[in-house]
Amino acid sequence: MVSPNPVQAPPHIHALLTRLHQESTVQEEALGPYLTTTPAAFDALMRDKFIALDEDKCRFTYQLALATGARNIAEVGTSFGVSTIYLALAVGRNVARLGGEGRVIATEKESNKAARARAHWAEAGDELVARWIELREGDLLETLRGDVPLLDMVLIDIWAPVALPALKLLEPRMREGAVVLVDNSISSAERYKELLAHLRSPTGGYTNLTLPYSKGLEMSVWHGAATEG
Ligand SMILES: C[S@@+](CC[C@H](N)C(=O)[O-])C[C@H]1O[C@@H](n2cnc3c(N)ncnc32)[C@H](O)[C@@H]1O
């Protein structure tokens, strides 16, 4: 028996998510292994690509956000905003259940991608999705420097060189027990090796597990202490 979709949302949001995942999958299959010479060439190649988090991983992320009551989530790498929709749906439900405030801090450096993401969130609707998202446009190593609430969850779905610096930037704002998810921790283990070494170090402040999704999904729990500010 196939497991039902855990995501609770009206039909137009399910239709949107199905369409966006399909577009992303078709693009990635056409892309093949992407080897480019320079970071600039890589950025140019990726400027019109989704590279969305896989649908099953998005559903897991949504479930995890509900289970942990996550109300403040940082998304490191937003692109056209697919995984963001799942995070926003979960944050909205958690705020309705637990009270208080909550938001998904989304991050995207490409302005065309940020515009497409905003259009997708508008299509999903303000009530359930758009109102829960604060998109920070620009290099996230700058945009995440200030005004970060105490975080319950961090989703890292980003080009490898930015991943560890982004996590280190956010660690002082992560609550004890915050969950960090990193996509492609098996397939990109070499590119992510510094990040994974940090997450897996016995003295790094995390307990860590590699989830056996296609290409891997790293799930780490932070046991360090957030600092004020
Ligand atoms: C793998 S995609 C994110 C996919 C998204 N999580 C989803 O499921 O739809 C990574 C995105 O991070 C963006 N990015 C890469 N480096 C960045 C940086 N330094 N600051 C902000 N965004 C960056 C890229 O432009 C790209 O759109």
Image (spheres, rainbow, N blue to C red):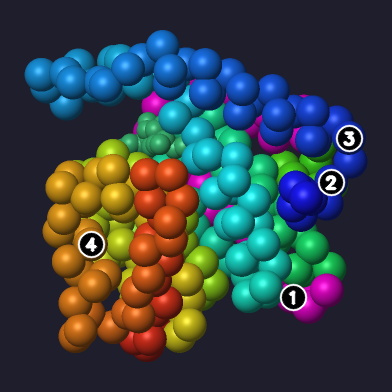
What is the quadrant of residue 198 in the picture? bottom left
Query: Does residue 71 appear to the left or right of 124 in the view shown?
Result: left
Label 2 lies in ligand 1 vicinity (Cβ under 8 Å):
no
Write down the residue under mark 4: 196
Q: What is the crowding at mark 4: few (fewer than 14 residues within 10 Å), some, or many (at least 20)?
A: some
Which of the two labelled residues, at mark 1 and mark 4, occupies the earlier sequence position? 1
Which of the two labelled residues, at mark 2 and mark 1, occupies the earlier sequence position? 2
131 above or below 15?
A: below
Query: Where residue 9 is drawn, which disc sits there?
Result: 2
Report the mark closest to the observer, 2 or 1.
2
How far apart in space, not on screen, are marks 1 and 4 (Cα)?
33 Å
Query: Where residue 11 is drawn, which disc sits there?
Result: 3
Residue range in magenta is: 97-124
- Residue 101 on the magenta segment: yes
How far apart in space, not on screen, are marks 2 and 4 (Cα)?
34 Å
Give the amino acid type for the residue marked by disc 3 in the picture: Pro
Q: What is the crowding at mark 1: few (fewer than 14 residues within 10 Å), some, or many (at least 20)?
A: few
**Is 12 in front, or is 141?**
12
Give the amino acid type for the residue marked by disc 2 in the picture: Ala
- What x and y, as percent, mark residue 205? 28, 83
Q: Residue furthest right?
A: 10
Q: Is residue 84 visible?
A: no
Label 3 lies in ligand 1 vicinity (Cβ under 8 Å):
no
Give the amino acid type for the residue marked by disc 4 in the picture: Leu
- What x and y, as percent, mark residue 47? 38, 19
Classify mark 2: helix, strand or loop. Answer: loop
Query: Where residue 100 is drawn, which disc sits there?
Result: 1
Report the mark closest to the observer, 1 or 3.
3
Cβ–Cβ under 8 Å for marks 2 and 3: no
